[in-house]
């Protein structure tokens, strides 16, 4: 090799080394600037978890903007003046990569995360504020991660407090209405004493959680996780009772848990699994007799489908996994869809098999469905996340009755026993997300389209205990609760709120009003 060639190779080597040296080292940047708040393993701390599962709903450009500019109304600072654009880009890409080795969250981790205020046992056993506790609204404000308590008679805020980051799913109440349990996407459960306006206990049930359910007797809380693939069962003070691996009986396949709901008349939790074609039922009735098996035999599970009984899993094999689901009035059937859509499965929880299939176009959001009497029968009506349509299904015979066209795809549908109307948003529509369609439950015909804030998103309706007022979310950071007279459909007032994601009327929830989620 000539000297000239050696020199060129040497120069190329130096340039490559220099370029390599300038490559931003994302793990080191993370350790230096982010780990103190988001945790060394990105599992979260003062700030939220930064795992691919937690970031599914945050688009990459939005993540970069947050790193650059910070998040107003939170403690997240902007890094534009500390980090070069390529360093920010490297960090932005890195947080979407899986953590290696995969993070684990054991029973010991759950127990170690728990905090409990022992003094809570001495707090007064009656509301320390003057309002009807059964007409209280718990409002989750996603804009700045707070919760507001609204007096449903005076239609005014009586208290506001900070929540965990990104609460999801409806908060759940203890049977007498004193305690509310919130679940966050990062896996935190908070037990809050509504009468004393203080946090009682907190625990981290998982790393990425779907929702929580509270047993009708108030003695148990169940959490459904995506990460790890598990359910976690707690006592009323969030002390771990046991966890369940969300897996097939032979343990060969595990699954994310889609959701857990309390089936009060059955004294059980019912659980849908996203990746395994099984529906689970876990009885919390201490008198539960082992139920004789044999009604359903499935070659995949063999003879011992389950060892049912108190706090054990009873498995119903399905043809395909269920995602979102819904109960009929007597809680005899679960009606569920898979995210692929196209049809709903009706599963009889007693005989433990699918008893009907309902054709349902698009992606029905069954968790937001409602039931009501119509034409001498009872129907289920559900909005649709993909299409501008509400599907109405006769629950006697499980046949579609009508498709009501809406301005666009929507998330939530609500009504109340004392109103002839049902309200549906179109918040998934780029053009009609500012509309609310009101339909008449008697005729299944549209009555009015409301547009209270043109160009701005409105969604999620909940009624006062007596059904006189409908509270609608103006779903913006400088948003509001818009209160309507439920009979005249005229606006009554606006209560300013920071992106009020959802609102929950205690009385309607505890009475299991037919017009709201349970
Ligand atoms: Fe939800 C409830 C699933 C995205 C706001 N959502 C639920 C429930 C399920 C569910 C299974 C019922 C749990 C309960 O109440 O105990 N949600 C899903 C999804 O699969 C989906 C489409 C995707 C995801 O990333 O999870 C989804 N949900 C959203 C949102 O983007 C919403 C609009 C905003 C947000 O903050 O996450 C949202 N979901 C809600 C709300 C409820 C809810 C407000 C409670 C409704 C109620 O009135 O009970």
Image: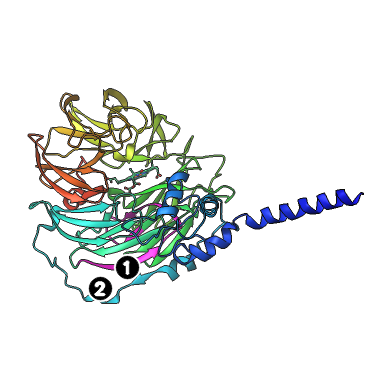
Q: Position of residue 441 (x, y in %)?
A: 17, 29
Q: Which quarter of the figure has residue 436? A: top left
Q: Which quarter of the figure has residue 25? A: bottom right
Q: Earlier in the sequence, mark 1 or mark 2?
A: 2
Residue at (41%, 50%) from the top-left corner? 291
Kindly identify which residue carries mark 2.
120
Q: Position of residue 42 (x, y in %)?
A: 50, 60
Whether pointer 1 and pointer 2 mark residues with C-beta atoms closer than 8 Å, the reply is yes
> Could you tell me which secondary element the residue under label 2 belongs to?
helix
Circle number at residue 341: none
Q: Quadrant of ligand 1?
A: top left
Label the magenta part by its dominant secondary structure: strand
Image check: 152 left or right of 12? left
Q: Which quarter of the figure has residue 197? A: bottom left
Of 390 and 356, the residue lying toward us: 390
Is 433 covered by the magenta stretch? no
Give the alpha-carbon distance from disc 1 to disc 2, as whole Å: 9 Å
Of 425 and 392, the residue lying toward us: 425
Circle number at residue 201: 1
Q: Position of residue 457 (x, y in %)?
A: 26, 38
Question: Magenta residues, as a range?
Answer: 197-221
């Amino acid at each position: 090799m000539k000297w000239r060639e050696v020199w060129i190779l040497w120069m190329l080597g130096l340039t490559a080394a220099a370029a390599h040296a300038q490559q931003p080292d994302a793990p080191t940047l993370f350790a230096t600037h982010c780990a103190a708040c988001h945790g060394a393993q990105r599992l979260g701390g003062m700030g939220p978890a930064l795992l691919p599962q937690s970031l599914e709903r945050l688009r990459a450009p939005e993540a970069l903007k947050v790193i650059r500019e910070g998040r107003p109304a939170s403690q997240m600072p902007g890094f534009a003046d500390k980090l070069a654009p390529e360093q920010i880009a490297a960090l932005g890409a890195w947080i979407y990569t899986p953590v290696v080795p995969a993070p684990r969250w054991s029973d010991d981790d759950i127990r170690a995360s728990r905090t409990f205020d022992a003094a809570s046992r001495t707090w007064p056993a009656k509301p320390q504020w003057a309002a009807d506790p059964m007409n209280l609204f718990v409002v989750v404000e996603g804009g700045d991660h707070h919760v507001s308590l609204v007096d449903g008679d005076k239609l005014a805020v009586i208290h506001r407090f900070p929540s965990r980051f990104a609460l999801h799913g409806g908060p759940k109440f203890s049977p007498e209405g004193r305690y509310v349990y919130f679940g966050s996407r990062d896996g935190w459960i908070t037990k809050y004493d509504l009468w004393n306006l203080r946090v009682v206990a907190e625990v981290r049930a998982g790393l990425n959680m779907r929702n929580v359910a509270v047993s009708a007797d108030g003695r148990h809380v169940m959490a459904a996780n995506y990460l790890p693939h598990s359910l976690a069962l707690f006592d009323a003070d969030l002390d771990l009772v046991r966890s369940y691996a969300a897996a097939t009986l032979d343990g060969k396949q595990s699954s994310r848990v889609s959701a857990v709901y309390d089936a009060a008349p059955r004294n059980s939790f019912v659980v849908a699994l996203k990746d395994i074609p099984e529906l689970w039922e876990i009885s919390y009735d201490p008198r539960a007799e082992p139920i004789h098996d044999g009604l359903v035999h499935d070659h995949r599970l063999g003879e011992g489908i389950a060892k049912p009984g108190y706090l054990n899993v009873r498995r119903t094999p399905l043809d395909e996994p269920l995602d979102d689901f819904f109960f009929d009035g007597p809680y005899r059937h679960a009606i569920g869809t898979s995210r692929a859509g196209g049809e709903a499965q009706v599963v009889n929880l007693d005989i433990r098999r699918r008893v009907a299939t309902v054709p349902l176009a698009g992606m029905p959001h069954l968790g937001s469905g409602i039931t009501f009497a119509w034409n001498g029968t009872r129907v289920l009506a559900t909005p649709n996340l993909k299409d501008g349509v509400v599907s109405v299904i006769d629950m006697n015979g499980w046949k579609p009755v009508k498709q009501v066209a809406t301005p666009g795809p929507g998330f939530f549908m609500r009504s109340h026993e004392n109103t002839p109307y049902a309200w549906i948003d179109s918040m998934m529509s780029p053009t009609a997300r500012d509309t609310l369609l009101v339909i008449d439950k008697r005729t299944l015909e549209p009555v009015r389209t409301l547009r209270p804030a043109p160009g701005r998103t409105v969604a999620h309706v909940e009624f006062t205990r007596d059904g006189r007022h409908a509270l609608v979310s103006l779903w913006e950071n400088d948003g509001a609760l818009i209160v309507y007279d439920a009979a005249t459909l005229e606006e009554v007032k606006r209560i300013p709120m920071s992106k009020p994601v959802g609102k929950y009327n205690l009385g309607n929830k505890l009475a299991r009003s037919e017009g709201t989620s349970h």
